[in-house]
């Protein structure tokens, strides 16, 4: 459904950047000379509704940050009919004045707290802030955001597919899991795999969630739940991700059920080169974490699982997926190469 929606949107604009599973930036340059943007936005909404059944919000702005803000307003206030156009500077300032600084794209809770301390509580106050002061107290990303709020485009539309915005590692168990220790081992394994994928795309995450579920069919008691945690800083350190996942598991685990599936999902991504770290936070990244993770990845590249975390337990644990029907790996595993006699 997401792919279908993105394909339709791509047909309606000169350029497209698929930002996430349900968000897309479009280049609509010149369209306003043919048709009012609000009318065009309603046409987009109607086509998506007819062809997919999905209801979307549409926001227009001269920069990505203002477009995101317009989209947020389109979803928040029903009187907008799902479309907000921020082409006008007057409209921009009116909406900025109504928007809490925490609702701005790219402004996380730690930065929000610091801004509150500086007396910046609304998006308009941030937009009107002195750039030198912003540069002194924050990093280049916040400076770009401030400039974008003033209509200065600093974040270009990317035609190339962006890194994934969510990573999920989820499996059904070979046998039902009834012991907390077995579930912990599974979560450690799934968290490890998710962390590896995160580093492969050179990202860090702040949002970590863990889910567990019984089977959906049969007469057994059913239960499913999810727990989420927000890291103090963006991380791709497997140890941090395992720790958060296990803490989440401890809050949702219930005895007496036969669990059939579990998973770990990562979100709220930052590129490693531009990740924001808060010097005021009590929690800081571990020393030499990047070097250690790089070493683990290098070793495991020559054979997955050569080095693993003890919390995963034995490799042939009963809960792991049944693999009797796994296709032979002729090109990567010597013992799977068929012999001819």
Image: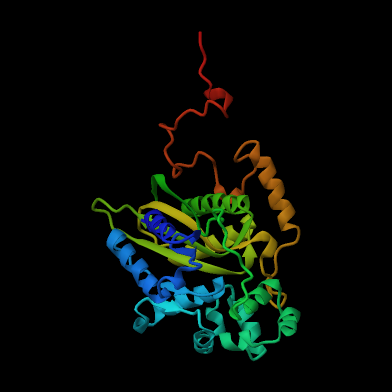
Residue 190 in percent (x, y) is at 52, 51
Does residue 48 appear to the left or right of 159 in the view shown? left
297 and 203: which is toward the camera: 203
Which residue sits furthest front? 34
Does the image show residue 44? yes
Which residue sits furthest bottom? 119
Residue 39 in percent (x, y) is at 37, 74
293 and 76: which is toward the camera: 76
Q: Name above or below for residue 301 compared with residue 96.
A: above
Does the image show residue 121? no
Does residue 76 appear to the left or right of 53 in the view shown? right
24 and 310: which is toward the camera: 24
**Quadrant position of the N terminus in the picture:** bottom left
Which residue sits furthest left? 219
Q: Residue at x 75, y 61 (%)?
A: 287
Q: How is the image coloured?
A: rainbow
Q: Residue at x 35, y 53 (%)?
A: 258
Instruction: Report how many numbered discs are placed on residues in the image.
Output: 0
> Looking at the rendering, which quadrant does residue 52 occupy?
bottom left
Residue 300 in percent (x, y) is at 64, 41
327 and 173: which is toward the camera: 327
Q: Residue at x 56, y 83 (%)?
A: 101
Q: Residue at x 60, y 64 (%)?
A: 156
Residue 230 in percent (x, y) is at 55, 69
Does residue 249 appear to the left or right of 125 in the view shown? left
Does residue 299 appear to the left or right of 183 in the view shown? right
> Looking at the rendering, which quadrant does residue 237 occupy?
bottom right
């Amino acid at each position: 459904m997401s792919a279908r929606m993105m394909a339709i949107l791509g047909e309606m604009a000169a350029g497209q950047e698929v930002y996430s599973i349900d968000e897309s930036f479009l280049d609509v340059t010149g369209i306003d000379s043919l048709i009012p943007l609000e009318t065009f936005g309603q046409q987009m909404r109607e086509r998506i509704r007819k062809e997919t059944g999905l209801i979307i919000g549409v926001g227009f702005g001269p920069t990505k940050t203002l477009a995101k803000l317009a989209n947020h307003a389109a979803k928040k206030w029903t009187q907008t009919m799902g479309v907000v156009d921020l082409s006008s500077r007057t409209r921009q300032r009116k909406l900025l004045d109504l928007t809490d600084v925490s609702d701005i794209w790219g402004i996380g809770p730690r930065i929000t707290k610091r801004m509150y301390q500086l007396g910046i509580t609304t998006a308009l106050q941030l937009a009107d802030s002195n750039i030198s002061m912003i540069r002194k107290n924050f990093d280049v990303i916040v400076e770009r955001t401030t400039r974008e709020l003033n209509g200065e485009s600093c974040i270009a539309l990317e035609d190339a597919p962006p890194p994934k915005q969510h990573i999920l590692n989820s499996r059904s168990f070979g046998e039902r899991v009834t012991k907390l220790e077995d579930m912990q081992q599974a979560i450690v394994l799934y968290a490890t795999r998710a962390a590896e994928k995160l580093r492969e795309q050179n990202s860090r995450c702040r949002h970590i969630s863990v889910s567990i579920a019984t089977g959906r069919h049969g007469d057994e008691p059913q239960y499913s739940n999810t727990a989420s945690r927000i890291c103090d800083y963006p991380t791709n350190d497997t140890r941090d991700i395992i720790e958060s996942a296990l803490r989440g598991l401890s809050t949702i685990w219930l005895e007496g059920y036969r669990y059939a599936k579990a998973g770990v999902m990562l979100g709220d991504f930052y590129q490693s080169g531009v990740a924001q770290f808060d010097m005021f936070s009590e929690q800081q990244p571990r020393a030499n974490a990047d070097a250690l993770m790089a070493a683990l990845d290098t070793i495991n590249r020559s054979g997955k699982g050569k080095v693993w975390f003890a919390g995963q337990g034995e490799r042939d644990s009963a809960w792991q997926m049944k693999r009797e029907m796994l296709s032979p790996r002729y090109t990567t595993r010597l013992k799977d190469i068929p012999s001819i006699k």
